[in-house]
Image (tube, rainbow, N blue to C red):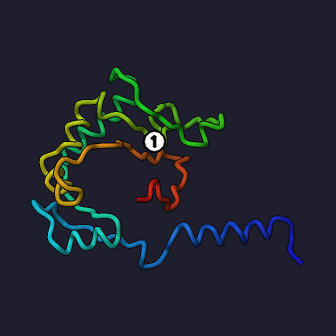
Amino acid sequence: MMGPGLLELDEAERIKRRLYRRDATQLARIAATCPAALTDADLAFHRKEGYLAVDSLLSAEEVEECKAALSDLLHGRVEGKVGCQQEPYYREGKIDERVSDPELTVRKLWSFCKVEPRLERMAGHPRLVPLLDQLIDPGHRLVQDMALIKPTFHGSEKPWHQDTAY
């Protein structure tokens, strides 16, 4: 005989195992350096797997510049409207005494490139654009900008998902 909640736990575990893979398929392929141009193998990998990850697309200084820009947006030091979603824990009205910085309550920011010049510059970075030209074709355009943030203490999981299918 099953105790109360056991069926729900089994269902939760089944869903967890389906959404949060813990096998070889979760291991990403990451190029050690950002290439000036993609190879045929890179393009084939992107077509098959749906992503390409490269290390060193941005320098450490550029990453810090992006982090500062996001922080400035989160603290209202940049004028303009951006999308902002709080982490569900805080959105539900819960409070954590350890968290005094509003930056640590945010899950996602979007639509910031038009109001934050540093982030707009990174979206058109000279190492990124030639790669996008190969993947998408020259003349591509930015249709969405988004920063997914995992706040300390209460950052919730982001399951595998698909935003749009073509």
Point 34% across, 29% down: residue: 72
Q: Is residue 11 above or below residue 151?
A: below
Classed neighbour count for the residue bearing mark 1: other residues with Cα under 10 Å, few (<14), some (14–19), many (≥20): some
Residue 6: x percent and y percent? 79, 69
Point 11% across, 62% down: residue: 37
- Say left or right for 124 vs 92: left
Camera-side residue: 60 or 144?
A: 144
Residue 41: x percent and y percent? 19, 75
- Say left or right for 83 vs 125: right
Point 71% across, 69% down: residue: 11
Determine which quarter of the picture holds residue 122. Answer: top left
State how many labels appear.
1
Camera-side residue: 121 or 40?
A: 40
- On-image quarter of the C terminus: bottom left
- On-image quarter of the N terminus: bottom right
Residue 2: x percent and y percent? 86, 74
Camera-side residue: 93 or 118?
A: 118
Q: Is residue 44 above or below residue 34?
A: below
Determine which quarter of the picture holds residue 42. Answer: bottom left
Camera-side residue: 141 or 92?
A: 141
Question: What amino acid is labelled 1 in the image?
Answer: Lys
Point 29% across, 71% down: residue: 29
Determine which quarter of the picture holds residue 5. Answer: bottom right
Residue 112: x percent and y percent? 34, 33
Q: Circle 1 is placed at which residue position?
A: 108
Q: Secondary structure at mark 1?
A: strand
Query: Going by the picture, which residue comes out furthest to the right?
Result: 1
Query: Going by the picture, which residue comes out furthest to the left?
Result: 36
